[in-house]
Amino acid sequence: MENGNRILVRALVILFLLLPGSGCKNVLEDSAKTSTDEALFFEAKQLMNSGDWTGAITQFERMSAAYLASRDVAPHYASAYAGRCGLSYLGFVESLGSIGTTKLFRFLMNTYPGSAATHVADCETAETILLTSVADPNLRTVDENLLVAFTAFTKLGTILNTYADTDDDGSPDGGFDACNVGSLADADARQVGTGLAIALSALQAAAAETTIGSGETATLTSGCADLAVLAPSFDFCSVTDPASLTADQVKGIRSVIQENEWVGIGSCNNTLDNCLCP
């Protein structure tokens, strides 16, 4: 009788495990389903929709390397880092449309108050993800190019706010000197320069399909042309790799940051030719 009870209990356990929706087998299946790349991607997008950038990044970084690097996923992954950096895509488009006569760098500096080095790092990561996904702007879609440009602009804004407007009053700090490494380290100046070059190339590639950023493209192009005439060795506007910039090109970046003629924050408050760093 005792053996019969044991057999009955064992049979019931086996039956329970085989029933749909019950037992370890289905628990394991459900767990596997929620840890697939597709499930993680869905969860990451849900977290992004709620503004939980860190949570989304965690989900992205649980995905397989190949899936994460795919062209469909990489822009979302980059957007999570860009969001944590401070970029609000629609908000940025709206703000850019009402920039008026404000110089681009001053506008960007004021768009990201309260920025810190951590925000800058997140923007750099987002930018790297996007450029690794599709390096050639002519091979990107218009949406990809706009995301690249806005991420680069956000990187610019966070750097300038962090170091040039520490009190968030909308104007360059009195002691800020763009030519001085004590005010802006070379590494950050290089990121400003490559940010401008990356944004400009992306906007130029997208120009045939959208007018977003067209005014900024024209002004950046004119400012770069002026710099190339005034100080040819300072021209940095086509360099997208920070390590490839020469010492003179870094001086050119610093000069453009401080001028008040084309795109600068106006800490020099003069034309570009009168604001060239020595």
Image: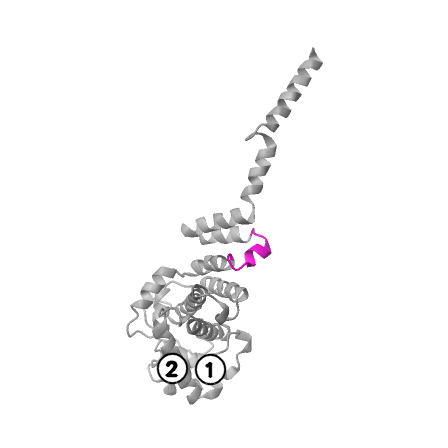
The image position of residue 40, as x and y in percent, is 52, 48
Q: Amino acid at mark 1?
A: Lys
Give residue 251's mark: 1
Q: Residues within 10 Å of mark 2 (few under 14, many from 20)?
A: some
Check disc 2 and report the residue beneath it.
222
The N terminus, quarter of image:
top right
Q: Is residue 71 magenta?
A: yes
Horizontally, is 63 left or right of 226 in the view?
right
Residue type, mark 2 in image: Ser
Quadrant housing the C terminus: bottom left
Indicate which label's residue lies in the foreground, 2 or 1. 2
Please say whether residue 104 is visible from this viewpoint: no
Residue furthest to the front: 208
Q: Position of residue 138 (x, y in %)?
A: 48, 71
Mark 1, other Cα within 10 Å: few <14 / some 14–19 / many ≥20:
many
Q: Is residue 26 in the magenta section?
A: no
